[in-house]
Structure formats: structure tokens, C-alpha cells
Image (cartoon, helix red, strand yellow):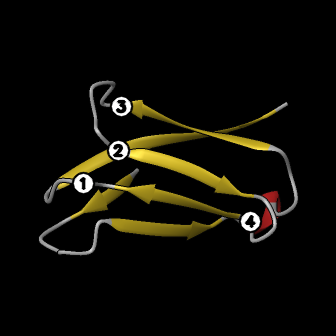
């Protein structure tokens, strides 16, 4: 779950060290109609989530294989 609460910063980056270097697919699961994006950076082991609207949250799934 990634939140954006009352900030002008639309991006959040979360480090997932045990997946560093892995081929991972980041998917916004909920809400399905969200205008959020999620992208995986394998080299850094980070998922970058963009939340365009303030006071929103999304559930992101990281899947391998």
C-alpha cells in the first residue's frame, strides 16, 4: 500500500532489497480505476509509484516469473 497525503510530491520510491536484480513486474491492483503508475527498477531494487492526486492510496503487487 502506497499513500500520498497532503503533499505536492507525486512520486514515492520504495526499496525492496531482496528483489534487487530480479525481473519484477509492478502492477497497481487497487483501485483498478486509479491514475497511478508503478515501475520497477531492477538495478536499484526499487519500485517507483506515481500518485497524481493528493490524499490517495494504491495497492501495488510485485510479481516475479
Report helix, strand or loop for mark 1. loop
Q: Which residue shows up at 58% across the image and 50% down it? A: 39
Relative to 57, is 10 above or below?
below
Identify the residue at the far top of this view.
32
Structural distance between the alpha carbons of marks 3 and 1: 15 Å
Residue 42 x, y percent position in the rendering: 78, 59
Is 33 displayed left or right of 1 in the figure?
Answer: left
State how far apart marks 4 and 3 are (Cα). Answer: 22 Å
* Other-residue count near label 3 (Cα within 10 Å), few / some / many at <14 / 14–19 / ≥20: some
Distance (Cα) linking label 2 and label 3: 10 Å
Work out whether mark 4 precedes mark 3 in sequence or the reverse, and give the earlier one: 3
Q: Earlier in the sequence, mark 2 or mark 3?
A: 3
Give the residue at x 30% y 30%: 31
Q: Give x and y (percent) for residue 50.
A: 38, 56
Residue hosting label 4: 45
How far is mark 4 from mark 2, CA to CA?
A: 20 Å
Quadrant in the rendering for residue 5: bottom left
Q: Which residue is mark 2?
A: 36
Label located before the other in sequence (4 or 2): 2
User: Which marked residue is nearer to the observer: mark 3 or mark 1?
Assistant: 1
In this view, 14 is above or below 60: below
Image depth: mark 4 or mark 1 in front: 1
Q: Are marks 4 and 1 in contact (CB under 8 Å)?
A: no
Question: Can you give x and y, in whole percent of width and height, for residue 15 in the image?
Answer: 63, 70
- The front one of 59 and 41 is 41
Q: Which residue is mark 3?
A: 30
- Horizontally, is 53 left or right of 43 in the view? left
Q: Which mark is residue 52?
A: 1
Secondary structure category for the residue under label 4 = loop
Q: Are marks 3 and 1 in contact (CB under 8 Å)?
A: no
Amino acid at each position: 500500500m502506497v499513500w500520498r497525503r497532503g503533499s505536492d510530491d507525486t512520486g514515492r520510491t520504495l526499496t525492496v532489497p531482496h528483489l534487487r536484480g530480479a525481473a519484477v513486474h509492478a502492477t497497481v491492483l487497487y483501485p483498478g480505476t486509479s491514475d497511478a503508475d508503478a515501475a520497477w527498477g531492477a538495478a536499484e531494487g526499487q519500485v517507483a509509484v506515481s500518485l497524481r492526486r493528493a490524499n490517495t492510496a494504491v495497492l501495488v503487487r510485485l510479481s516475479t516469473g
